Amino acid sequence: MKLKTLLKTSLVVGLFAFSTNALSAGVMKEMIQMKKQLNALNQSQTSEEFQAAAEQFIEYSKDAQHTMPKSVGDDQERFKGYQAGVQEVIDVVNQANEKAKAGNLAEAKEMIEQLDEMRKKYHKEYK
């Protein structure tokens, strides 16, 4: 009986620890995925490759947009600013994706060059 109770307690503690780490790492995980997709955007050789990477980038960005980073604490106004910054990034990628869909891969890649400056700006403020 004690072993059963010990196992249940260990399971509950383990799940709590995992969920706490998962929540705190949420934005970090999405940001890492966004960086990978940004690399894919930059390395794309065709409009189709660009579009696939853009769609993934946007999906990860939207997930990150709804996750409050640790750096903002419980400050809802800062969180709104963070969300607006992520939306600005999403808008740029959407516009670039439209260029790629129209067959203008070079213009699409040119548009995403501004993401590096945006990343620096928003990481400085919200990281």
Image (tube, rainbow, N blue to C red):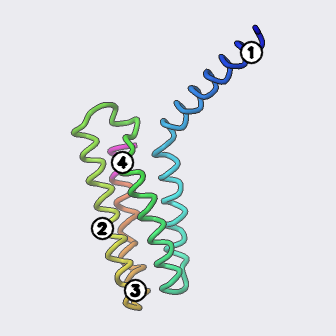
In the foreground, 11 or 17: 11
Q: Are marks 1 and 2 in contact (CB under 8 Å)?
A: no
**Mark 1 element type:** helix
Helix, strand or loop for the magenta stretch, by majority = helix
How many residues crowd mark 2 within 10 Å: few (<14), some (14–19), many (20+)?
few
Q: Are marks 3 and 4 in contact (CB under 8 Å)?
A: no
Residue 56, percent from left and from top: 48, 66
Numbered badge on residue 91: 2
Q: Which residue is mark 3?
A: 101
Q: Which residue is mark 1?
A: 4
The residue located at (48%, 59%) in the rendering is 34
Q: Are marks 2 and 4 in contact (CB under 8 Å)?
A: no
How many residues crowd mark 3 within 10 Å: few (<14), some (14–19), many (20+)?
some
Q: Is residue 33 above or below residue 79?
A: below
In the foreground, 55 or 32: 55
- What's the residue type where badge 2 is placed? Asp
Which span of residues is magenta-colored? 122-127
- What's the residue type where badge 3 is placed? Lys
Check the picture and name the quadrant holding the C terminus.
top left
Mark 2 or mark 1, which is nearer the start of the sequence?
A: 1
- CA gap between label 4 and label 1 equals 39 Å
The residue located at (40%, 72%) in the rendering is 113
Mark 4 or mark 3, which is nearer the start of the sequence?
A: 4
- CA gap between label 1 and label 2 equals 53 Å
Mark 3 or mark 1, which is nearer the start of the sequence?
A: 1
Q: Residue furthest front?
A: 1
